[in-house]
Amino acid sequence: KEATYITENINGDIIVTDWKKNAVIVVDELGIFRYSYVGRDNYFVVSSVATDSDGQVIVTDYGGNRIHMLDIGGQFLRYVIPEGGVKRPRAICILGNGEMLVGGNLDGVAKRIRYLKE
């Protein structure tokens, strides 16, 4: 309905965030629905999405002030909460080497965050 952010995963899946549905929607390369993710609590407000070289899906949660990490099939793995937290995470970019850059909407600060162990 209202795709806001879009990315492609290593397996060809197309992943979008939909603010009206407050969900991450995933379809395969033919447009066939694979799964959706709506967070784990009532504070979840979807914002942006990115994927890494392992196919993990990283979703910013504007309402919950955290980052959700999913496996390639959409199963929740864990929250990524950097030291000092993150205020209204909006934009996300995977930098490689287990790091991401997350932009906070409330304070305008971009944080470099290590989300994978070396």
Image (tube, rainbow, N blue to C red):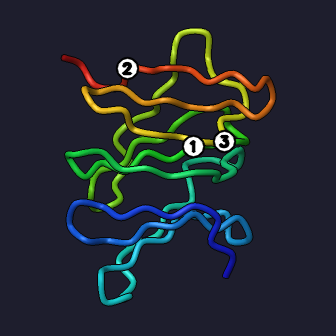
The image quadrant of residue 66 is top right
Would you say the residues marked 3 and 1 are in contact, meaning their CB atoms lie under 8 Å apart?
Answer: yes
Residue 37 at x, y percent in the picture: 49, 62
Secondary element under disc 2, as helix, strand or loop, is strand
Marks 2 and 3, Cα distance to the nearest angstrom?
17 Å
3 or 1: tag closer to the N-terminus:
1
Residue highlighted by disc 1? 60
Camera-side residue of 5 and 80: 5
Residue 32 at x, y percent in the picture: 35, 88
Residue highlighted by disc 2? 114
The image quadrant of residue 38 is bottom right
> Residue flagged by tag 1: what amino acid is it?
Thr
Q: Which mark is residue 90?
A: 3
2 or 3: tag closer to the N-terminus:
3
Camera-side residue of 113 and 67: 113
The label nearer to you, 3 versus 1, is 3
> Residue flagged by tag 3: what amino acid is it?
Arg
Looking at the rendered image, the quarter that the C terminus falls into is: top left
